[in-house]
Each structure stands twice: as C-alpha cells, then as structure tokens.
Amino acid sequence: MPNPPAHRLLVLFAHPSLQRSRVHRRLLAEVAARPDVTLHDLYEAYPDFEIDVPREQRLLAEHDTILLQHPLYWYSTPPLVKQWEDLVLEHGWAYGAQGTALRSKRAVSVVSAGGREEAYRPEGRNRYSVEELLRPLEATWRLCGVTPLVPFVVHGTHRLDASGIEAEAARYGAFLDLLAAGGGEAIP
Amino acid sequence: MSIETFLPQAFVFLVAAVVAVPIARKLGLGSVLGYLLAGVMIGPFVLGLVGGEQREDVLHFAEFGVVLMLFVIGLELEPSMLWRLRKPILGLGGLQVVVSTLALAGGALAFGLGVKPALAVGMILALSSTAIVLQTLAEKGQLESEGGRSTFSVLLFQDIAVIPMLALLPLLATAAATGHDAGHAEATGWLTGLAPWLQTLVVLGAVGAILAGGRLIVRPALRIVAAARQREVFTAAALLLVIGVALLMKGVGLSPALGTFLAGVVLANSEYRHELESDIEPFKGLLLGLFFIAVGASIDFGLIGTRPGLIFGITLGILVVKGAVLFALTRVFRLGLDSALLVTFALPQVGEFAFVLLSFARQEGVLQAGTADPLVAAVALSMAVTPLLLLLNDRVIRPRFGTREQEARPADAIEHRAEVLIAGFGGVGSTIGRFLRANGVGTTVLDSDPERVDLLRRIGLRVYYGDASRHDLLETAGAHDAKILVVALNTPEATLGVVHMAKKHFPHLVLVARAFDWADTHDLIEAGVDHVVRQSLEPGLRLGVEVLRRQGFRAYQAQRAAQRFLHHDLESQDFLTGKRREDRKDYLSAVRARIEDLEEILLRDRRDSDQPRDEGWDDASLRREFGEK
C-alpha cells in the first residue's frame, strides 16, 4: 500500500563502521523491506566527507518526515552527520528570512545507545535522557521550522542478544508504519 | 614424409577434424567421439583417404599427444596432491591391473588359448586408454571429482605397469620369435644388455634426474629463456623440455608419458606453470585429435564385416569383465556409488598401448596373427565406444541408480582460487596487490617481467609469468573462477588489448583498469571497463595541494579544493565520454579529438566554480541578515 503523498519518509543513515554493527544492520533491513521509504546511506555516499549539497537539499525537499538513524557516539551523532548539518542546512534555504524549504516537515532521531535506559536518568551514570542529549538537533530542526518528534531509542545494545535485536527490529518496523501513516509524538 | 605427401595428408586430417568435431559437440557427443567418427570417415573403409601405412605412421606420431597431455596433467598436480593419491594409485590401480589381467586371461583360456598366450592377452587387455578417458572426462569437467581422481589414479598405475609388462612378454613366448625390428627393440631400450640390478639403477637414476633436474636446471633455464622476452622461444623451450624427457625415458625403457608426467609435477610449483601449460596446450590438443582420428581410421571394418560375431563378442566380453572388476574394486575401496559408476564406465576399454604390445607380442612369437588381429579390431572398437558409454552413464545410469547427491569434493582437493586477478605488477599493479593483500583479499598476479616475477615469488606472492593478453593464460590463471580483473599494464595499447580479450572470453569479470590520459579513458569506457582510474588525475591533484599550501592556503582548505576538483573532473569525464560517443564520427583524428577534449575541459573548468561551496561555514549572509546595519 503506497504511502499517502503527505508522508514520504527519508531515512538518513550514518554509521562509520556498519560492518561491525549487529543492531543497525537489522534495523536497516526493516527500512529496506519498505520500498516506499527512501534510504540514504551517508557514509556510503560520501566516504570522503565531500557532501553534494544540492543533492541533499533536493532529497529533503522531496520528503515529509526525515529520520536521522545512527549510533550514539559521545552523546551525539557521528561526525559526518554534523558535517551534513553544517553544509546542507544553509542559511537562506533551511532557515533565515528566505529559508523556508523545510517548513512543516517532521524530523525524528533513531539512535542506538550501548547503556541501558536506567543509565540515561537523572540518577543514572549518564544523568540525561537521550532525548535531552539530542537537544542541539531538536533546536536545529525547530530553527528550520521542522517539527521534532520524540526519538526512537534502542537501549542497551551491549547486552542485546539475537532475540532482543529481533524484538527491537519489530518495534522499529511498527514505528516506521506509524510514521508513514502520519503518526508519531511531537516533542512538546 | 615429403612435403608433397605431407600437405594433402594434413589437409585431409584437418578438414575431418574441423567438420566432425563441431557437429559432434553440437549433438552433445563430445569432441573425442567427433574425432573418432572423422577417422572412420576418412579411413580405408568409407572414403579411403588415408591408407594403412600412413595410418600407422600417424598413430605413432600422434601418440606424442598423450605424452604432452600427461605433462599438462602433471603441471596441474602438485607433488603434495600426488602424495595424497598414493593409496588409490597403488591400491585401486594395482588391484585393477592384477585382477583384470587374471580375469581376462581366464576368458582367453576359455577361448582355447594356451596358458602363456592367455596371460599375455590378459595383461595387454587390462590396460585402459589414458588419452580417450582423460580427454573425455576433462571435457565434461569430471576430472576433479572423486571418481575422476580415482580414474586418473588407475591410469597412472597402468602407465607404470607397462614397464614390467614389456619385460615379461618375451618370457611368455611359446613359438620362436619372428625377429625383432628396430622400432620395437626401442621400446625396451638399450638396457636389455645390462645386468638387472644395473638396469634398475639406471631407471631410478633417470627418475631422479628428472626430479632434481626439474628444480636445479629447468627452472633457472626457463628464467633465462623468459628474460629473452620472445614468446616463440619460450614455446620452443617448453617443447624441448617435453621431448627431451620423453627421449630420456624411452632410452631407459620407461614410459615417456610417465616421465613427462613427473616432469610436469616437478614444475607444478614453479612460476612458469601457467605459461608452460598454455604453450603446450595447443600442441597437445591437435596431436590428441590426430590420435583419435587415427584410432578411428584404424578400425578394421573389413575384419569386423567377415567375423562380426567374434569381434563384437570379444569387445563386449572385455567391456563386461573389466567393468565388473572396476565396479567391484571401487566398492571395496568404499567409493560413493556415483564415483564407482564413473570409474566403471570410464575405464573398461583397452588402451592405445595395446596396439604396440599386440604387435610386440606377435614379433616375440607370444601370439599368433589369428589371435592378434581380431584383438586389434576389438581394442579399437572398445576405445570408440568409450565416449558413448560415458554418455550412457551420464544420461541414463547415474540419474537412475546413482546416489544423486552432489559429490562433496574433499576440501584439500580444491586448489585455492583467487577472486581477483591483477594483470601487470609494475608501480600501480604492485600498489593494488599490496593494498588488497593488506586487507586480506586474495590475488593472482600475471606479469611479464621474469626477474620481478622471481623476486615476488620468493616473497611468497602468487605471481605468474606470462603475457596477460593471452586468453588461454588468463584461463589457466583462474579467470573463470575470478570475479574481478584489474588491468594495470604499462601501455594504453596493452591495457586495451587485455580489456577486449577479457570482454570476449570472460564476460562475467568485473573490469577495473588504469588509464593514462583522457583519450584512453574514453577508449576503455567504450570497451566496457566497469571502473577506469586515470593515473594523471590524483597525483596531479596531490602535487597541486602541495603548491596551494606553499601559496598560503590552509591545509584543510587546499585538501577540500582538491576533493572538489576531483569530483568536478570526474563529471567532466562522464560528459566528454558521452559527447565522444555521440559525435565519434566527426573526429578526423585522435590528435584532433585530444585537443578538442582539452579545450572543452578548460572551458568547463572556467565555467564551473572549483571552489568548495561550504556556505554553511560562511557567515557573510548571516551578517547581512542579522548584523548591525
């Protein structure tokens, strides 16, 4: 069943060593199983960090909900995502008086974290939740007029066994279907 | 043979081969049967284009094809592999010869022969045809299977067994010998005059000479010949080697085929293996073809016509007795049913050496003409039906009774084949080879510089000497199993040559090639290369980055400028290739095209911004919008 035109999904995927990943490879299979969802593998497209800005802007313009899928490195994104933000979200295109290209779109982070959820609490060793740690991204989207959604987080990847990964993949599949149908909870 | 008789003869044989073999292959009968039928056609009983005496000559001459074949087989069999085959060779092979000899001798006794002639007949008929069996199995790709290896082992033992047989036959004589002729005295060699222990010593010495000489003399000699970089001289050296070994073996009374086989095994580890193989291959193929034609032509339809019952009876008897012995022995040796059936249907015929032994036995007075002649006819007939028997096994017997399981090849029987072939190991080729090796990707390298090949092999790389534009060499280097071919030869012409050849013969290969400038980049892309890297591009940019830095550019700024330019340049290349394809005909000369290319590139350079866009890191527009006015 094709998505209604209003909910085209774009997955921007960033993983500098996918060959070592168990979780993201399985999550990607969920994306690949949905032909209506566009998958864009940033590290595969730009191994030399030479980002094709017009191409990226075209892709963003053609979709309605942008998923930023990556592992959490030092409470943040892998470096290519930061490079991508710097160069693609240009003043006068994404924000500023003339920058209206992304207005009314939605964005959501899909991240994996090694620590368990208890660690990402005020009393835990990481003190902040993943949603809180990703505030800079949230602020970036808000400045561009994009509605940020509550992130999809896979916690405790260090301890996940095969059946655990399967369960997370199923949860991700359901999440993709929810987004495609226009659902998803916005960050207040 | 004078040129007047040679040329028409050669013409007849070649026409027969060229006409019959493609038809036979088209019908799925295999080339061996095609050659045999061609021989029957031009033989004395159909078209009568070849007479009896020529036929004998040709048969003797063409037997050298068997010698060449065993040399090539030896080249493909490393010594360690031969050692692993010792059990099937001695066990299965040895028992096959002994049991078949006794069974067939029993049959001959039943026909009313005396004990001694019966024993001689048994020995002679116990041998099988190396030429027909190996060629047919190789064509079907069955040599590498368990059954194929066992078949080969039996044939190898038979080659060894010929030596004691030649010594035994005279002892079985009942009538007075009708006299030696020179040709057959040769078969036992000049050694007959020596004491037995001395004979043994000479024989062992000859084998030792081949084993030691192969390592100590032949390899350095080949290196010197290869350094001359004259392809036909290397071919000559290869033939010289085989003929030399064959002569030595004949001299001491051993089978020449056995000797060249050993020489092949000794050289199987050498860097010249592929080159030797592809040099000998065409000679081997032609001579074997000739041999099969001669066998076809020598089937005596006259005799078969007068006594069909007897001849067919003998043939059938031989096939059934030998087949039964083979089947029983393979089961004793616990081969799988598929393998046992293959061996049984491959080896029940009588071999070409029986022709020699039968006439030798007649000379020695062991057999009477009345016994020998029907046997000769039966031998030829049994050889002729072999391809049909194997066809029967493949199409009817095995599908119905075989185990049907895919034969699991023993892991150590498979030679490791690299997935990447690198043609040319100069500057660029060696960088690729080292890089792939550092990342655990197996490579096979072909290079035509003998000194470099030698050096690299000592380091332990899989490097072979040879001209990569020869498809047969690429094939022996494993092009059929490889996935990627990297062409890094040192001239545009050589590069394009290999690309055309690979596209034609190995269309499955992904081609990656080094180009020199714009012009040959176009040519390579047009020729179907999957990825072309122009050597003038990246080193030029790296030098440019150094210059920019000395002009005061920040390192990252210069680096990004180079990367941007690289992408721009590759876009220009795509554009130009498309343009060249459209108006290819408009170019009068390559030089003109090259100048126009350069002009186009320079114009595009000026038109497109080479500066990285990077506006995200530039706050000029932000200052305009938000800054103090």
Image (tube, helix red, strand yellow):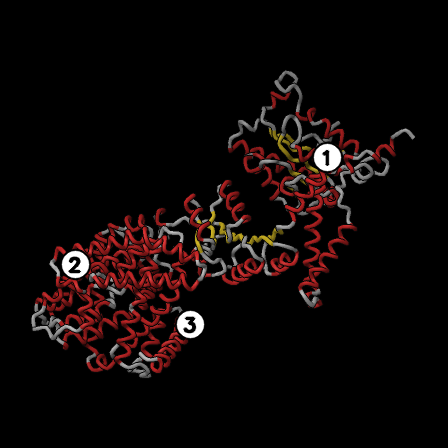
Q: Are marks 3 and 1 in contact (CB under 8 Å)?
A: no
Closer-to-camera residue (B432/B401): B432
| Whether residue B338 can be seen here | no
Q: For mark 1, what is the residue?
A: B554
- What's the CA distance linking mark 2 and mark 1? 86 Å
Residue at 15% x, 68% y: name it: B121
Residue B242 x/y as whole percent: 32, 62
Q: Amino acid at mark 2?
A: Val
Residue A55 x/y as whole percent: 73, 45
Mark 1 neighbour class, 10 Å CA radius: few under 14, some 14 to 19, many 20 or more: few
Q: Secondary structure at mark 1?
A: loop
Closer-to-camera residue (B114/B189): B189
Q: For mark 3, what is the residue?
A: B22
Residue B115 x/y as whole percent: 8, 67
Residue at 44% x, 54% y: name it: B465
- From the image, state whether disc 2 or disc 1 is nearer to you: 1
Q: Amino acid at mark 1?
A: Arg
- What's the CA distance linking mark 2 and mark 3? 39 Å
Q: For mark 2, what is the residue?
A: B98
